[in-house]
Image: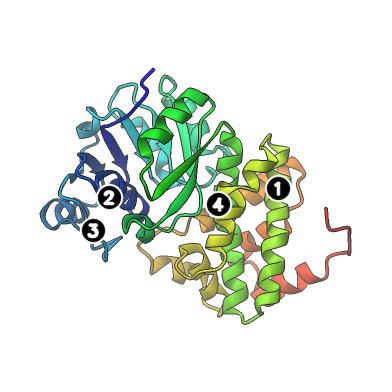
């Protein structure tokens, strides 16, 4: 087994993919990034910047971009940073090889209720798989600000090798074998960030936001434990850590989407105006449906799903949550 990876490719040229590529290329290491948008590829190669998705970050000259997935064939590890709805198609087009796939996208696939790792097991069965998840704003990672994150893989040797290859003085991966917990934490926190943004946009106050974070974490924990996640993962960087970050700042795409909903703007209009994806908007109806199928009570998640679909108003959602029967806090 490879003990160190040095030729990284990044699949996805959005803000997070670009930030990860810059992290790896900052000291002059060659990194190849695939982007769907030709203008992103051209700007990275000619100007060393990504004006569409990470406009204020200067990029290393050792970071080069391509629109052809075949150009990633020489890479010995691939970071996959593609929104979950498009993940299956992109994985099917990857060049053949045994480079590990490190999934950095968060969410569940509609219909199948599959997480990124599950999709990879269907399509890229021979490759090692890992998940990178935690409290990370892309612009801060690109700027070299201190960051800690979870690197989860079922094989602890693979997890250790990938974490050691990604680590930088300002970027600290913590190793875990709980892939399920890392993926569930990342998916659910995006939904809860929309809910907290709604609270902020509607002017419901900091008490309400703190309550929502706490009760939302209870939902995340119920859902995660029911699917085999470990409690310490959900209480760690990939769960509670990421939840706190994205539920308290308008730098979060999900939080800012929620702010717009809280002000009474239509979800369809808000999402149509965005180049960047608020992953929670896609995850909410999928996670809500999966929870119903499993008999797991997730009222906040369900409310966000209905708000994003335009089925209810914010005032209706708030009233429904506040009028639920009183119960012990642990439920």
Q: Position of residue 126 (x, y in %)?
A: 41, 19
Q: Position of residue 118 (x, y in %)?
A: 52, 32
Is disc 4 in contact with disc 2, using a CB cutoff of under 8 Å?
A: no
Q: How far apart, in angstroms, are the residues tagged by discs 2 and 3? A: 11 Å
Query: Sequence order check: which comes first, mark 4 or mark 1?
Result: 1
Q: How far apart, in angstroms, are the residues tagged by discs 2 and 1? A: 33 Å
Outermost residue toward the left?
A: 46
Q: How far apart, in angstroms, are the residues tagged by discs 4 and 3? A: 26 Å
The residue wearing badge 4 is: 283
Query: Sequence order check: which comes first, mark 2 or mark 1?
Result: 2
The residue wearing badge 1 is: 221
The residue wearing badge 2 is: 22
Secondary structure at numbered mark 1: helix
Is residue 299 placed above or below 174 in the rendered structure?
Answer: below
Q: Is residue 167 visible?
A: yes
Left or right? Give the position of 255 relative to 29. right
Which class describes the residues within 10 Å of circle 3: few (<14), some (14-19), or many (20+)? many
Query: Sequence order check: which comes first, mark 2 or mark 3?
Result: 2
Residue 324, image quadrant = bottom right
Report the front residue among 103 and 268.
Answer: 103
Q: How far apart, in angstroms, are the residues tagged by discs 4 and 1? A: 16 Å
Is residue 267 placed above or below 221 in the rendered structure?
Answer: below
Residue 202, image quadrant = bottom right
The residue wearing badge 3 is: 50
Is residue 214 placed above or below 173 in the rendered structure?
Answer: below
Q: Residue at x 29, y 61 (%)?
A: 54
Which class describes the residues within 10 Å of circle 1: few (<14), some (14-19), or many (20+)? many
Secondary structure at numbered mark 4: helix
């Amino acid at each position: 087994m490879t003990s160190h990876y040095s030729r990284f490719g990044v699949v996805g040229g959005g803000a997070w993919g670009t930030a990860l590529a810059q992290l790896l290329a900052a000291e002059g290491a060659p990194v190849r990034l695939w982007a769907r948008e030709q203008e992103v590829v051209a700007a990275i190669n000619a100007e060393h910047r990504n004006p569409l998705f990470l406009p204020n970050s200067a990029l290393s000259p050792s970071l080069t971009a391509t629109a052809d997935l075949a150009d990633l064939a020489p890479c010995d590890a691939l970071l996959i940073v593609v929104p979950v709805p498009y993940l299956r198609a992109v994985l099917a087009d990857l060049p053949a090889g045994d480079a590990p796939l490190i999934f950095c996208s968060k969410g569940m696939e509609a219909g199948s209720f599959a997480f990124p790792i599950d999709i990879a097991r269907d399509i890229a069965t021979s490759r090692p798989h890992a998940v990178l998840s935690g409290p990370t704003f892309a612009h801060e990672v690109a700027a070299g600000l201190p960051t800690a994150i979870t690197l989860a893989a079922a094989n602890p040797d693979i997890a250790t090798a990938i974490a050691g290859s990604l680590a930088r003085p300002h970027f600290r991966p913590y190793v875990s074998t709980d892939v399920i917990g890392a993926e569930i934490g990342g998916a659910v926190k995006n939904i809860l960030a929309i809910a907290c943004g709604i609270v902020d946009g509607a002017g419901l106050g900091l008490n309400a936001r703190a309550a929502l974070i706490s009760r939302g974490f209870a939902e995340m924990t119920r859902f995660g434990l029911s699917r085999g996640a470990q409690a310490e993962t959900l209480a760690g960087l990939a769960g509670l850590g990421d939840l706190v970050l994205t539920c308290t700042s308008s730098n979060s795409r999900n939080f800012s989407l929620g702010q717009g909903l809280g002000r009474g703007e239509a979800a369809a209009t808000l999402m149509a105006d965005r180049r960047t994806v608020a992953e929670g908007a896609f995850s909410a109806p999928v996670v809500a449906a999966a929870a119903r199928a499993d008999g797991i009570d997730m009222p906040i998640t369900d409310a966000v799903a209905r708000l994003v679909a335009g089925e209810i108003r914010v005032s209706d959602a708030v009233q429904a949550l506040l009028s639920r029967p009183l119960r012990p806090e642990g439920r």
